[in-house]
Amino acid sequence: LVCATAIGDGVLDVLCARARREGTLSDATLRDLHVLFDKTLQSAVDLLDFATITRLSPRGAEGRAFWKVQSTSGSVYHCFSGYCSCQAFAFLVAHTSQSLCKHQLAVRLADTTGRFARQELDADMWGVELLRGCGESMP
């Protein structure tokens, strides 16, 4: 399971690098992504097209960013490296070999294409938003 996940992540890295070089998510790249992510890809592309994807970082500490995905229905999910606050993520990690939910894949595609908003927050507000993201999926 870990090996399959690592291989999938590596292939995703290669496909994202290709898309950056091409300046777009070409049909060939989308076909290759579909092989890896099947139905999750369409959901992620829908989020990329219609949701608000925001990269949140504390002022002066660009490398400590995380992501917020707000769907058109108003639902908000927080994505960190290796984690998403959605319920589907917990299921995927526990029961499948897929390592990314639609929100995480949408974030990777947004980062690759530059189709996201940037928000710098004061350290205190960034911490509040971070805690909000970590606590969403808790009972």
Image (cartoon, rainbow, N blue to C red):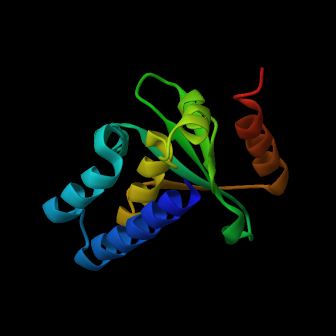
Seen as rendered, the residue at the extreme bottom is 21
x and y percent of residue 84 in the render? 61, 42
Near-viewer residue (90 or 104): 90
Question: Is 138 located above or below residue 94 in the figure?
Answer: above
Q: Position of residue 98 (x, y in %)?
A: 47, 47
Number of numbered discs present? 0
Residue plotted at (61% across, 37% down): 94
Depicted 30 relative to depicted 134: above or below: below
Can the viewer see residue 45 in this picture? no
- The residue sitting at 75% across, 39% down in the picture is 134
For this orientation, the residue located farthest to the left is 27
**88, above or below 34, in the image:** above
Whether residue 102 can be seen here: yes
Task: Tell me which corner region of the image, top left, top right, bottom left or bottom right, holds residue 21.
Answer: bottom left
Residues 98 and 136: in front is 98
Left/right of residue 130 with respect to residue 113 in the rendered view: right
Residue located at (64% from left, 36% from top)? 85
**Which residue is painted at 75% across and 45% down in the image?**
130
Check the image and name the residue furthest to the right: 124
The location of residue 81, given as percent across then percent down, is 63, 57
Where, quadrant-wise, is the C terminus in this rendering?
A: top right
When the figure is inspected, residue 86 is found, relative to residue 17, above or below; the finding is above
Identify which residue, 29 or 130, lies in the foreground.
Answer: 29
Question: Residue 125, how many percent across, how many down?
Answer: 79, 46
